[in-house]
Image (cartoon, rainbow, N blue to C red):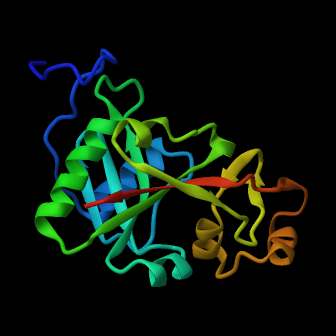
Amino acid sequence: MDRKHYSNSGLLKSPPIRVMTSKQANDMLDEWHYLGRVRGVIYALGHKGGCCVFTNCRSRVYEQKHSGVIELARMVGRPNHRWAMSSLMSKCIKWLKRNTNYKLVVTYADPFAKHDGKVYKSAGWVFDGMIGKDGHPLFFIDGERISPRTLYDRHGTQAVGAMNKIYGDRLELKLKPLKKRFIKSI
């Protein structure tokens, strides 16, 4: 590889990015991301080894307070990649700045998945507080975490009672920890 190292991490800069289809990005997410695919993809940007997926902001209250906001819903890289995730993210943000009218990107670090937001901080994102629980517990089926959106896609509901009927003893519920919210002006 002839790409230069990214900062002092020893990791390489991300390969050039391109616009991807929702299917291409969701195939990567299904294979490499602990939460899997995303519905409602607005933009999927990346390369054969990783991608960033942007959707409408999930917080309607936050969206009303800030005009022109989009959410970085998922970011993933092939296992054992040698390029910096912050480099991929920076390239995607630059693409959004050049090609869209969005003014702000919001994303979240999930402490349950041991994400603390270091990659966002290293890419110049600003910590914007902790967000509370959104009403859904964490769903685990046979020990694997399943997002409420995935359950809704599968069953037309994500209600705890319905999930208990469908999955019985295979279902485990856990309380969510607070997530860190990060924002990036573009």
- Pinpoint residue 114: horizontal percent, then vertical percent: 63, 37
Question: Which residue lies at the image location 43% right of the left edge and 54% below the top edge?
Answer: 74
Res. 146 image quadrant? bottom right
Q: Which quadrant of the figure contains the C terminus?
A: bottom left
Question: Which residue lies at the image location 86% right of the left edge and 76% below the top edge?
Answer: 161
Height in image: 115 above or below 54? above
Q: Tell me if 37 is positioned left or right of 20 in this view.
A: right
Question: Which residue lies at the image location 82% right of the left edge and 77% below the top edge?
Answer: 162
- Pinpoint residue 108: horizontal percent, then vertical percent: 53, 55
- Pinpoint residue 48: horizontal percent, then vertical percent: 23, 41
Q: Tell me if 169 is positioned left or right of 12 in this view.
A: right
Question: Which residue lies at the image location 17% right of the left edge and 71% below the top edge?
Answer: 100
Height in image: 156 above or below 180? below
Q: Is residue 166 visible?
A: yes
Height in image: 152 above or below 87? below
* Residue that sits furthest to the right in the current view: 169
- Pinpoint residue 34: horizontal percent, then vertical percent: 56, 46
Q: Nearer the viewer, residue 149 or 63?
A: 63
Q: Tell me if 2 is positioned left or right of 28 in this view.
A: left
Q: Tell me if 147 is positioned left or right of 95 in this view.
A: right
Height in image: 111 above or below 53? above
Q: Nearer the viewer, residue 4 or 166?
A: 4
Report the number of discs: 0
Q: Is residue 49 visible?
A: no
Res. 170 image quadrant? bottom right
Q: Which quadrant of the figure contains the N terminus?
A: top left
